[in-house]
Image: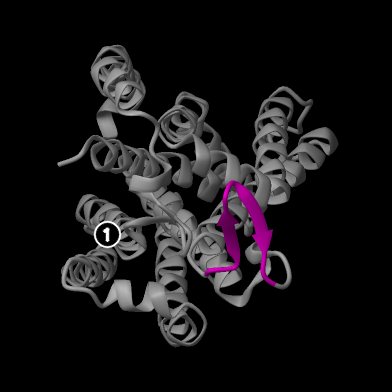
Amino acid sequence: MSLEIVLGGLGVVGVLAYGLLGGADFGGGVWDALATGPRKAAQRRAIARAMGPVWEANHVWLIFVIVIMFAAFPSAYAALSEALFVPFHLVLLGIILRGAAFVFRTYSPGDSRGMDGAGALRWGAVFGVASVITPVLLGMCLGAVSTGGVHVSAGTVSIDGGPPWLTPVSIGIGLLALALCAQLAAIYLANETTDELREDFRSRALLASTAVVVLAAVMLPLLQARAPNLWRGLLAARTLPVLVAGAGCAAAAGVALLRRRYRIARAATVGQAGCILAGWALAQYPYIIYPDVRVMDAAAPAATLRFILYTLPLGLGLLLPSLYLLFRVFKGEHI
């Protein structure tokens, strides 16, 4: 297997990790914004407790993907930075506002329940809005590189028609990304709560799971009509088994939720989200930006790729044990 394929695969692994961990944090913000009923303050406290120790650490996977891109595939990174300048900067703004709002909300004066003071509500609104918009934009960026609206010729980027991240396919993928984040968060939270709060997050998990299935069903004919290359990739022999496995995981997650088997539901939902992201990557291969930028064409010189590949174990040797310790200390009872 060539060096560029190995490093591209590692980049996809980073996307998967960010989707499963950072995506759940975004989903937590969604449910924070939608907290309702007599236990809404308790719901927000549960979300804050679940996110508080790990939410910043999860962004390390986004940094990992960015480093892989600009070091191993610099021409693709440059083209993406130009073609998706607006959504990338909106994502950055969303992450910054979300992080600042989470901290300021935590230390704002509140009422006796701790989450309903005027300052806390204002910062909570910022936190919720940023948590909704950011995963939608990230999904729209994935859609933009798959639909053929971005062209790169001799290092020059051109756009067909309007912004490629505002096409129906890109918007649909953005909404699917939001639903997946909400589903992951609700199921993770159901594992970390008890009694009535657990039932609250169980009902939200069922709602989000339904939304994922509906959006996925809507996307299929849309892809066939508007993104035929991605549609053919999804039906390819290398991709279809992954998607079938994802559908099986989705069914298993739904049954487990109905039977209140929360750990099984969590494992199945992780498998479902992982299969969806892996299926997209396999369907997109060999393109980073369809139809002009392939993995092998955008790769840095072999010496650079070797250096990245040989030094990655050193960085991961520090990162992975640190993350394991972090999650073991703060999430050990729920693992």
Q: Is residue 200 above or below residue 127?
A: below
Q: Position of residue 1 (x, y in %)?
A: 15, 42
Q: Position of residue 28 (x, y in %)?
A: 53, 46
Question: Which residue sits at x=29%, y=15%?
Answer: 311
Q: Position of residue 2 (x, y in %)?
A: 20, 39
Q: Magenta segment, which residues? A: 148-160
Q: Secondary structure at mark 1?
A: helix
* Left-right relation of 28 to 199: right
Question: Which residue sits at x=27%, y=26%?
Answer: 332
For residue 159: magenta? yes
Q: Is residue 77 above or below residue 267?
A: above
Dominant SS type (magenta): strand
Near mark 1 (Cα within 10 A), the count class, few <14, some 14-19 or many ≥20, is: many
Visible in this render: residue 280? yes
Q: Is residue 7 above or below residue 256?
A: above
Q: Disc 1 residue type?
A: Cys
Q: From the image, which quarter does the C terminus lie in?
A: top left
Nearest the camera: 268 or 290?
290
Which residue is the site of mark 1?
275
Question: Which residue sits at x=32%, y=22%?
Answer: 308
Question: Which residue sits at x=19%, y=55%?
Answer: 264
Nearest the camera: 172 or 104?
172
Visible in this render: residue 193? no
* Left-right relation of 225 to 248: right
